[in-house]
Amino acid sequence: MVKIKKAKQKLFKKIIYWIFLVFLVYLIYELLTKLFGGSLGFEELVIGLLIANLGYSFYLRDSINKLDSKISGHLEWHKGKNNK
């Protein structure tokens, strides 16, 4: 049961990541079209970039948490503690 939940959670994170990636590609396209005579207004483009920044911040938070837990475990190993 736990393995199924973790698999679903991992799949959900992967789907959200790919949707976010497609959104970023779309924003890059819109930014380039704005530079060359553009379709979106400035406000819409700024709001989209802010949303992208927020999404990337959440992604980085996950990565930093994983790295922090690895470093903590490694430092505890050096101190002689057992992580079981």
Image: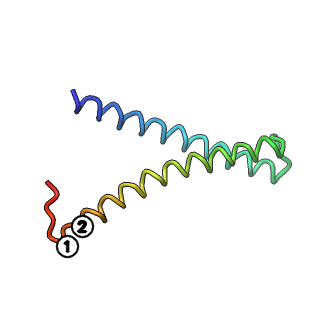
Q: Secondary structure at mark 2?
A: helix
Mark 1 surroundings: few (<14), some (14-19) or many (≥20) residues within 10 A? few
Which residue is found at the position 29% from the left and 61% from the top? Answer: 70
**Residue type for callout 2:** His
Foreground pick, 64 / 45: 64
- Quarter that holds the N terminus: top left
Question: In percent of the image, x 36 and y 55: which residue is there?
Answer: 66
Q: Where does residue 83 sit, x and y in percent of width and height?
A: 17, 57
Q: Quick one: which residue is furthest to the top in this view?
A: 1
Question: Where residue 45 appears, x then y in whole percent?
Answer: 76, 45
Work out whether 12 lies above or below 63. above
Q: Nearer the viewer, residue 3 or 19?
A: 3
| Depth order, front residue of 5/42 | 5
Q: Which residue is mark 2?
A: 74
Which residue is most to the right? 37
- Residue drawn at (47%, 53%) of the image: 61
SS class, disc 1: helix
Quarter of the image where one finds residue 80: bottom left
Distance in Å between CA atoms under marks 1 and 2 = 6 Å
Q: Which residue is mark 1?
A: 78
Mark 1 vs 2: CB contact within 8 A: yes
The amino acid at mark 1 is His
